[in-house]
Amino acid sequence: MGSLSIWHWLIVLAIALLLFGRGKIPELMGDVAKGIKSFKKGMSEDEDTSAQPTSATTTSRTVEHKADETK
């Protein structure tokens, strides 16, 4: 009862082809592949920048917080 037979999958595939058309599905899959590639590229760029040591010219400042200032 829980599994679908080959005929169920063929009917689902036929309906998907009718809704999206033959040319639309490969286009969608290409867009998904491009998105995955750009995501992987972005992740590798983040790792590259975090692995580099910070330069000596970078200054860091702290913000003073006064506990008795309330609004």
Image (cartoon, helix red, strand yellow):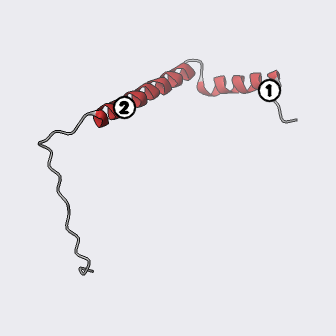
In terms of image quadrants, where is residue 40? top left
Q: Earlier in the sequence, mark 1 or mark 2?
A: 1
Tell me, for residue 47, which label it has, or none.
Answer: none
In terms of image quadrants, where is residue 11? top right
Residue 46 x %, y % = 34, 35
The residue at 70%/23% (across/down) is 13
Looking at the rendered structure, the kind of residue marked 1 is: His
* Towards the viewer: 56 or 24: 56
Q: Which residue lies furthest to the left in this view?
A: 57
Q: Mark 2 points at which residue?
A: 42
Q: Mark 1 points at which residue?
A: 8
Kindly report the distance in space between the C-alpha atoms of the residues bearing marks 1 and 2.
40 Å
The residue at 17%/56% (across/down) is 61
Q: Is residue 64 left or right of residue 23?
A: left
| Local SS, label 2 | helix
Residue 9 x %, y % = 76, 25
Q: Is residue 4 left or right of residue 70?
A: right
Task: State if disc 2 and disc 1 touch (CB < 8 Å).
Answer: no
The residue at 15%/45% (across/down) is 58
How crowded is the residue under tag 2: few (<14 C-alpha within 10 Å), some, or many (20+)? few
Residue 59 x %, y % = 14, 49
Looking at the rendered structure, the kind of residue marked 2 is: Gly
In terms of image quadrants, where is residue 70? bottom left
| Local SS, label 1 | helix
Q: In this view, does 6 lie to the left or right of 58?
A: right
